Amino acid sequence: MIIGVSIRLQRLPFLGLRVKQLAQKKLDTCLLSRPSRRFVSVYRTPSKASIPERLLIYHAGTGRIVFVGSLKVTTIFLFSATLLFIAPTIYNDQAQPPWVAPSVAVASAVPLFYVVYYASPFVAYVHIKLPLFARRSREQLLRWSQNMPPDTEVEMTTIKSYGSLRTTRMPMSELQPIKARFGIENLVRVPKSTTRSSTGTQRPWWARKEQSLFFVGTERRKTVETAVWQKAMEQIRNSHNTSGKTIHT
């Protein structure tokens, strides 16, 4: 269409040479700019299938996460109520022996320590940091997951004793399979010397120890993200089973 307009301009006798040159220059500029604008609009528009850099590859389930968090909060509330209200009431009761109040307080602490000990490794979410080329499509993501680099950053999110979330970041090479606490843990973090030196030579006395034991359940949802986590677990097991470093405690 633009080429046809250019030919008609050359055939108009009543237009001056200067006007024809300016019109032709304007048409040439428009003709050259249209493909480049189309190219920029196509490649600058974010795709609906774009994959985030921090990808969720494991989800324990909303029901399990709420149950574990509620159980921890309930045991804390039970222990606090017993220690502050029930035990003093029994102690002030003259009809009760003196050893009843301490026994009730100790008994209320048993569920608390049991839940804290056995539910602390429970992993609610697992995120993984993806490189740029693995985020272009699902096919590229699956192809990259076939052989992940050992320094791929993994984020394990666990539940604290009072119900809030706690995130621990580490390279995938620091994760090793483990069999402990009657199968409650299946992964352990073994930091390398380079990681320890980079984070600091000594942990402050008031700082809490980093989470090192994790339990990740079997996720059976058939999604691309779940397939990536299954490939990561296979790579962790294979890399340490071949070297005979599987930990038994």
Image: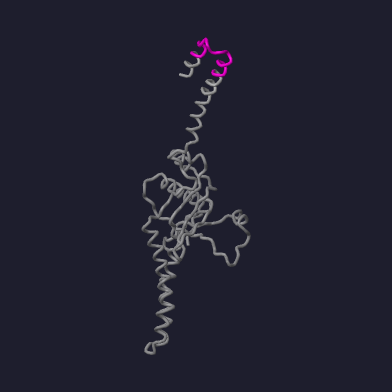
In this picture, residue 20 sits left or right of residue 146: right
Where does the image place residue 200, in percent across and percent down from the top left? 62, 58
Where does the image place residue 203, in percent across and percent down from the top left? 60, 63
Closer-to-camera residue (90/28)? 28
Closer-to-camera residue (95/106)? 95
Magenta region, residue range: 8-23
Closer-to-camera residue (225/213)? 225
Closer-to-camera residue (30/160)? 30
Q: How is the image coloured?
A: one colour
The count of marks equals 0
Where does the image place residue 123, in percent across and percent down from the top left? 44, 57
Instruction: Indicate the quadrant containing the N terminus: top left, top right, bottom left or bottom right.
Output: top left
Main secondary structure type of the part rendered in magenta: helix
Does residue 212 belong to the magenta stretch?
A: no
Rendered image quadrant of residue 93: bottom left
Q: Residue at x 52, y 28 (%)?
A: 36
Above or below, 138 against 178 in this view is above
Rendered image quadrant of residue 199: bottom right
Q: Residue at x 52, y 47 (%)?
A: 152
Where does the image place residue 37, in percent across and percent down from the top left? 50, 29
Q: Residue at x 44, y 46 (%)?
A: 228
Residue at the far front in the pictured view: 14
Above or below, 146 against 202 in this view is above
Above or below, 98 against 194 in this view is below
